[in-house]
């Protein structure tokens, strides 16, 4: 992929008092951000839809929306707003922690993760569900056996939950080298999301643009412009 479509990276949407990792966006701010996209003629879509449009050369006006970790607030706060704007999104869930909490974020707010029923409900609303690994461990440096489990087992587990194919993967923490990218591709995923632009950027290492609670009109315009400069999109 020589030109990358714009993909926004969210995590959690809920009211909060403290979040040192800045992964939480307030519902009011999130609603405003979706409205900003709509007012600028942009439509938020899942990665599945975005990549299908990219293959057909029809991504104009489309922006990928992704939500990492599979927080339970995706169901109550995110989906209703997406449906209001007729947007869709991809949520990447941790297959081995469904119904649990974000224990990997020590020192941050404790957040509940979607359970299997929530994952199925999100899919029924038209949202794409992808894998964020089995245990939210950094894949770089894992043994081959552990790497395979994080990538392959998570796909199988989510496909059993959904009764449908899971084609998308998202690298925990954005950590990935050529080894991890190859493992993801060989596991049968059609694409994978990373965070940063790098020499490996492509269908299985898609860069994304972080969006946080501080992102108003000026910052969103700047992030969109930066993407255009980098990728010509």
Image: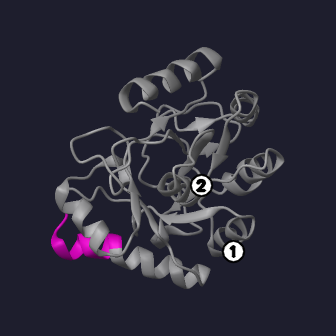
Asked if 20 appears above or below 158 in the picture, the reply is above
Residue 109 or 14: which is nearer the viewer? 14
Which residues fall within the magenta stretch?
Answer: 142-151
Residue 221 x/y as whole percent: 57, 20
Seen at 46% across and 35% down, the residue is: 209
Which residue does the image show at 39% across and 58% down from the upper left?
192
Which quadrant holds residue 135? bottom left
In the image, residue 196 sits, relative to residue 150, either above or below, namely above
Q: Quadrant of residue 44?
A: top right
Q: Residue at the right extreme?
A: 84
State how far apart marks 2 and 1 are (Cα). 20 Å
Crowding around mark 1 (Cα neighbors within 10 Å: few <14, some 14 to 19, many 20+) is few
Residue 115 among those drawn in magenta: no
Q: Position of residue 146 (x, y in %)?
A: 24, 72
Horizontal relation, residue 77 to residue 221: left or right: right
Secondary structure state at the residue bearing disc 2: loop
Q: Secondary structure at mark 1?
A: helix
Q: For label 2, count other residues whose C-alpha is less than 10 Å away and answer few (under 14), some (14-19) or many (20+).
A: many
- Between 95 and 33, the one lying in front of the other is 33
Which of discs 2 and 1 lies nearer the camera? The answer is 2
166 up-or-down from 61: above or below? below
| Residue at image point 55% right, 54% down | 53
Residue 10 at what x, y percent from top left?
55, 42
Residue 141 can be seen in this image = no
Residue beneath disc 1: 117
Q: Is residue 149 visible?
A: yes
Secondary structure predominantly adopted by residues drawn in magenta: helix
Which of pointers 2 and 1 lies earlier in the amino acid sequence?
Answer: 2
Q: Determine which residue is flagged by label 2.
A: 46
Q: Position of residue 155 (x, y in %)?
A: 43, 76
């Amino acid at each position: 992929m020589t030109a990358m479509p714009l993909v926004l990276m969210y995590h959690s949407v809920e009211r909060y008092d403290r979040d040192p990792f800045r992964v939480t966006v307030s519902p009011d701010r999130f609603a405003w951000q979706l409205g900003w996209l709509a007012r600028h003629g942009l439509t938020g879509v899942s990665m599945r839809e975005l990549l299908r449009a990219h293959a057909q050369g029809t991504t104009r006006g489309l922006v990928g929306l992704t939500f990492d970790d599979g927080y339970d607030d995706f169901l109550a706060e995110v989906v209703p707003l997406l449906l209001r704007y007729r947007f869709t999104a991809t949520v990447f869930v941790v297959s081995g922690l469904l119904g649990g909490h974000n224990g990997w974020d020590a020192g941050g707010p404790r957040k509940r993760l979607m359970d299997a029923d929530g994952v199925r409900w999100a899919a029924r609303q038209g949202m794409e569900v992808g894998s964020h690994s089995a245990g939210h461990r950094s894949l770089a440096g894992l043994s081959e056996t552990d790497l395979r489990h994080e990538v392959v087992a998570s796909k199988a587990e989510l496909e059993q939950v959904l009764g449908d194919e899971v084609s998308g993967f998202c690298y925990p923490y954005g950590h990935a080298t050529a080894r991890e990218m190859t493992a993801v591709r060989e596991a049968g995923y059609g694409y994978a999301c990373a965070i940063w632009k790098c020499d490996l950027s492509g269908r299985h290492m898609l860069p994304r643009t972080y969006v946080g609670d501080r992102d108003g009109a000026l910052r969103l315009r700047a992030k969109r412009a930066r993407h255009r400069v980098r990728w010509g999109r």
